[in-house]
Image (cartoon, rainbow, N blue to C red):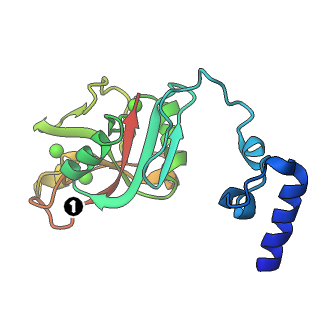
């Protein structure tokens, strides 16, 4: 370790000449001066999206609408998920309004379940999106939504990932309805 460090230091000294600062830890242990240049994306541009698309277990920008989607794998109730999304630059639980967005989201969440922002909390059977997108496209699994066949309230939408083509199921929104009504979830931000 020491030998390697000294060798790198010697190389840096040789390359940078008399201006080198002997106490600079970057020069002794850090990456070579060219590393940051090599790591820069080829398509990086000054006018790229202003806010980086990061957060949760996986985050990706949808090239169709340039929205940022963040998948959180830690299970939460709807209320807690809304709070977490809002903390990500004012995101909401995700809406899915067409087949292309559905496919993008399915690829992002993989085989995981994910709670979306659709709900029929206000009027049973009338679903809406938290971000007020029109609720027109749907991907309900056969027999869903069923509101638990009347057993209890299922007012939130959980999608079952890319393993099924029509993955939506209405599920309870919080633990006051059914214990452990918590899910991984997906946030979306314009
Ligand atoms: Ca959306
Ligand atoms: Ca319902
Ligand atoms: Ca259901």
Q: Is residue 33 left or right of residue 117?
A: right
Q: Is residue 182 above or below residue 109?
A: below
**Residue where numbered disc 1 is placed:** 181
What quarter of the picture does the N terminus occupy? Answer: bottom right
Between residue 174 and residue 145, name the one nearer to us. Answer: 174
Image coords of residue 107 (percent x, y): 55, 47
What quarter of the picture does the C terminus occupy? Answer: top left
Image coords of residue 33 (percent x, y): 77, 48
Image coords of residue 131 (percent x, y): 28, 29
Q: Is residue 95 above or below residue 136?
A: below
Residue lying farthest front? 18
Helix, strand or loop status at disc 1? loop
Q: Badge 1 local density, few (<14 within 10 Å), some, or many (20+)?
A: some
Residue at 81% across / 71% down in the picture?
Answer: 6
Residue at 18% across / 46% down in the picture?
Answer: 155
Residue at 52% across / 54% down in the picture?
Answer: 110
Q: Is residue 94 left or right of residue 118?
A: right
Between residue 120 and residue 188, name the one nearer to us. Answer: 188
């Amino acid at each position: 370790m020491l030998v390697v460090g000294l060798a790198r230091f010697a190389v840096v000294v040789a390359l940078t000449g008399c201006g080198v600062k002997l106490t600079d830890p970057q020069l002794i242990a850090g990456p070579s001066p060219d590393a940051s240049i090599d790591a820069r994306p080829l398509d990086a541009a000054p006018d790229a999206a202003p806010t980086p698309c990061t957060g949760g277990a996986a985050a990706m920008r949808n090239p169709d609408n340039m929205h940022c989607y963040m998948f959180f794998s830690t299970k939460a109730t709807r209320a807690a998920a809304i709070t977490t999304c809002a903390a990500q630059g004012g995101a909401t639980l995700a809406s899915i309004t067409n087949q292309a967005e559905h496919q993008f989201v399915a690829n992002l969440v993989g085989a995981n379940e994910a709670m979306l922002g659709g709900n029929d909390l206000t009027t049973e059977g009338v679903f809406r999106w938290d971000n007020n997108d029109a609720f027109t496209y749907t991907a309900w699994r056969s027999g869903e939504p069923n509101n638990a066949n009347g057993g209890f309230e299922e007012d939130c939408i959980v999608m079952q990932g890319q393993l099924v083509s029509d993955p939506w199921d209405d599920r309870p929104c919080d633990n006051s309805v059914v214990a452990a009504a918590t899910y991984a979830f997906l946030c979306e931000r314009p």
